Image (spheres, rainbow, N blue to C red):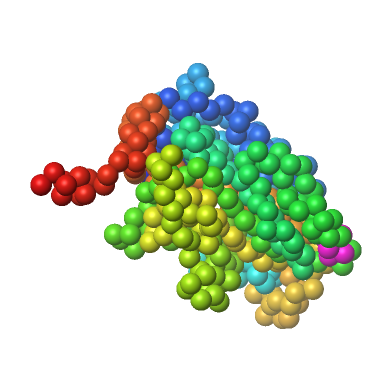
Amino acid sequence: MLRYLTAGESHGKALVVIVEGLPAGLPITVGEIQDELARRRLGFGRGPRMRFEADEVTLLAGIRHGRTLGSPVAIEIANTEWPKWEQEMSPDPGVPSKLLTKPRPGHADLAGMQKYGFDDARDVLERASARETAARVAAGCLAKALLARLDTQLLSHVVALGPEQVETELRPTPADLARVDASDVRCFDPSAEQRMVTAIKAAAKDGDSLGGVVEVLVYGAPVGLGSHVHWDRRLDGLLAQALMSIQAIKYVEIGEGASGAARRGSVAHDAITWDAKAGVYERATARAGGIEGGISTGGLIVARLGMKPLATLNRPVLGTVDVVTKESTVSFKERTDVTAVPAMGVVAETMTALVLASEVLRKFGGDSLAEIVRNRDGFVASLAQDPPSAAVAGGG
């Protein structure tokens, strides 16, 4: 199984992630991680911080001459703005120059201050910030590299932003990833893209923010990931938890989700067919999102997740209470974006990849990449044969 742990604050010296459980022999470079982190900064409506905060990646452990060693991988992402924050965020004894006592509605500020006994919202917001997802994306780059060696590829695209939605049912494939990333809002529908950009401009003019919906697609995932035998091993449950852990996410759907719940059973499921030539079972539709009974079916995995509008506004109007004076006021302002939905899609890919990579390791095992590939190939080959139980029965 794959385990990872991130550490670091938004304006701290660096973010750090440790990834444990990767097999030996997986090719990876700093450049690949930096490329993935650059994708996280994409999207019309992002603030100036995306230009200020370059992601300086250092591989600290677990990789030698471009390949994993089978030991824990440690990655550091330095904060290029650290000199501006060194005094305010110093780990040495001292006091901050200013206390943030007007918590922002919609953030972890007030609940975190109450939970941990803080009198300064910065003690909460620095870790609660979505900046932490940069460390997750670095870890997810490793997971994607492993999945790619098993012919599994992921991508995301924006299907709704603010009031605007895509009007086509066409879904991008891995071959369309560059086209999606080239879109100002990472949308596969050109007409919807322009409407989304217009909506962002209107919100920006008002100092407001927008949320939206992203769809994550997984092509080539093998059958058999996850399990029906325990509640905490169901693949759809694992994906839902991982995707809900992304900052500002308020709902997750697998497959048709809410729309499927409104249909009759006769049109809500995926019919099964047998391709004798290829020796595989197939499903012509993806209504279940590629997961049945908590197990991947081998078909297209589909997950949608909805992000609320960002709670930090360029024109603070949300009412709050000063925790010191108890007087009504408006929340303080940090640097913010009009929307982060396009970038959230990259983080959603990351969380999906980390879940799938962990389940791949659980299913196929092995200490080296070559061993895992052999185990996967053997399992796939066996699927075209009679099930073991039928073979035993037939043999009498």
**Observer-nearest of 166 and 38:** 166
In the image, 375 versus 7, the foreground residue is 375
The quadrant the N terminus occupies is top left
Residue 287 horizontal side relative to residue 227, left or right: right
354 drawn magenta: no
The relative height of residue 327 versus residue 363 in the rendered view (above or below) is below
Q: Quadrant of residue 246?
A: bottom right
Helix, strand or loop: magenta stretch: helix
Residue 111 in view here? no
Q: From this viewpoint, which residue is outermost toward the left?
A: 396
Q: Residue at x 79, y 73 (%)?
A: 317
Residue 141 in view here: yes
Q: Residue 42 at what x, y percent from top left?
A: 73, 45
Q: Which residue does the image show at 73% across and 70% down from the upper left?
A: 331
Q: Residue at x 75, y 74 (%)?
A: 318
Front residue (pair 110, 184): 184
Q: Considering only vertical position in the picture, is 150 above or below 303?
A: above
Magenta-colored span: 199-203
